[in-house]
Image (tube, rainbow, N blue to C red):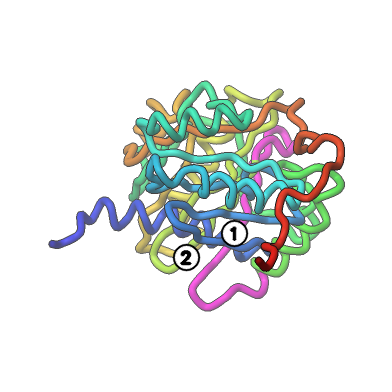
């Protein structure tokens, strides 16, 4: 059977997202039914997530034990990404562990080419200088994790592996940084990733200007099909106008901010529950 080209490009886009975490110092662990993406030194959900593919009802206990144990031992709070519609047993299992679905779906969109006309925007988009990498890293990390991401970005930009290229982008409005993104190419798939806008500048076209800049100038090279992950509430008209089409939708489960990563007390110590057999 010939694979569907759209499915091939979708899988390539998801692989490029995982490869970005790898090149920034993380790692990927594949278990039955899922892929675990982990970055111990940048403990934010965007770098620590589980892609759930196919976990059967009769095997969910082992799956949850292995996945959660891997993150919780490292004091990491992962998100779980489940293809819509989420299977009832996966939804119930995640809720039993304290995870809650986000109110809006996560949508993967594919596109290529350039918009027909440039947007009328006062936003300036450019590649940051090496001295500005700290300002770019601040869009995705706090002060504690920032040096790790800053170092990883510097290495990935200036010393890439043979099949990849990474270009950070910075959007400014009246000279002030308001939005940032990373364009990451792995083989022939390129993702416009980590698009983030400061709350005070939202609604002024900064994120759209970043995406449009990529489609017009191809900072990681021509001949690729671009992908972008977006919240369903914002993956509408503007991205469609820029030539993107939704290809896959997910529900993301996350832990509430006040959830504690702790196991219940085992209770008071008691006698051993197992004894070696005695000889007759």
Residue at image position (65%, 67%) is 156
Screen quadrant of the N terminus: bottom left
Q: Quadrant of residue 95?
A: top right
Q: Quadrant of residue 224?
A: bottom left
Closer mark to the observer between disc 1 and disc 2: 2
Query: Looking at the picture, how far across and down is residue 244, in whole percent?
Result: 35, 40
Residue at image position (36%, 41%) is 115
Query: Looking at the picture, how far across and down is residue 168, in whole percent?
Result: 63, 54
In the foreground, 77 or 202: 77
Number of numbered labels in the structure image: 2
In the foreground, 172 or 160: 160
Q: Is residue 238 left or right of residue 182?
A: left
Q: Is residue 178 magenta?
A: yes
Neighbor class of circle 1 (other Cα within 10 Å; few <14, some 14-19, many 20+) is some
Looking at the image, residue 97 lies above or below residue 17: above
Q: Earlier in the sequence, mark 1 or mark 2?
A: 1
Screen quadrant of the C terminus: bottom right
Residue at image position (75%, 52%) is 74
**Distance from Cα at disc 1 to Cα at disc 2:** 12 Å
Q: Quadrant of residue 13?
A: bottom left
Read off the residue under disc 1.
167
Query: Looking at the picture, how far across and down is residue 43, in whole percent?
Result: 73, 47
Query: Looking at the picture, how far across and down is residue 194, in whole percent?
Result: 59, 45
Numbered range of the magenta stretch:
158-179
Is residue 36 visible to the viewer in this orientation of the structure?
yes
Read off the residue under disc 2.
186
Looking at the image, residue 43 lies above or below residue 97: below
């Amino acid at each position: 059977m010939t694979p569907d080209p759209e499915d091939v490009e979708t899988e390539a886009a998801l692989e490029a997202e995982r490869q970005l975490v790898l090149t920034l110092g993380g790692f990927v662990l594949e278990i039955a039914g899922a892929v675990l993406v982990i970055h111990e030194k940048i403990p934010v959900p965007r770098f620590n997530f589980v892609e759930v593919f196919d976990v059967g009802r009769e095997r969910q206990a082992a799956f949850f034990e292995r996945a959660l144990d891997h993150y919780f031992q490292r004091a990491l709070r992962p998100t779980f990404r489940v293809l819509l519609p989420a299977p009832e047993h996966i939804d119930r299992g995640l809720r039993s562990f304290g995870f809650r679905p986000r109110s809006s779906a996560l949508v993967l969109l594919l596109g290529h080419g350039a918009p027909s006309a440039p947007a009328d925007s006062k936003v300036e988009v450019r590649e940051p200088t090496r001295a500005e990498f700290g300002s770019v890293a601040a869009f995705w990390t706090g002060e504690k994790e920032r040096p790790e991401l800053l170092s990883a970005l510097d290495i990935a930009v200036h010393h890439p592996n043979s099949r990849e290229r990474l270009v950070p982008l910075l959007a400014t409005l009246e000279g002030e940084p308001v939005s940032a993104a990373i364009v990451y190419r792995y083989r022939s798939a390129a993702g416009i990733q980590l698009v983030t806008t400061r709350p005070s500048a939202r609604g002024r076209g900064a994120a759209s200007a970043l995406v449009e800049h990529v489609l017009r100038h191809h900072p990681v090279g021509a001949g690729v099909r671009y992908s972008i992950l977006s919240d369903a509430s914002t993956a509408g008209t503007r991205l469609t106008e820029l030539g993107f089409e939704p290809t896959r939708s997910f529900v993301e489960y996350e832990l509430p901010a006040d959830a504690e990563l702790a196991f219940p007390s085992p209770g008071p110590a008691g006698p051993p529950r197992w004894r070696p057999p005695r000889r007759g």
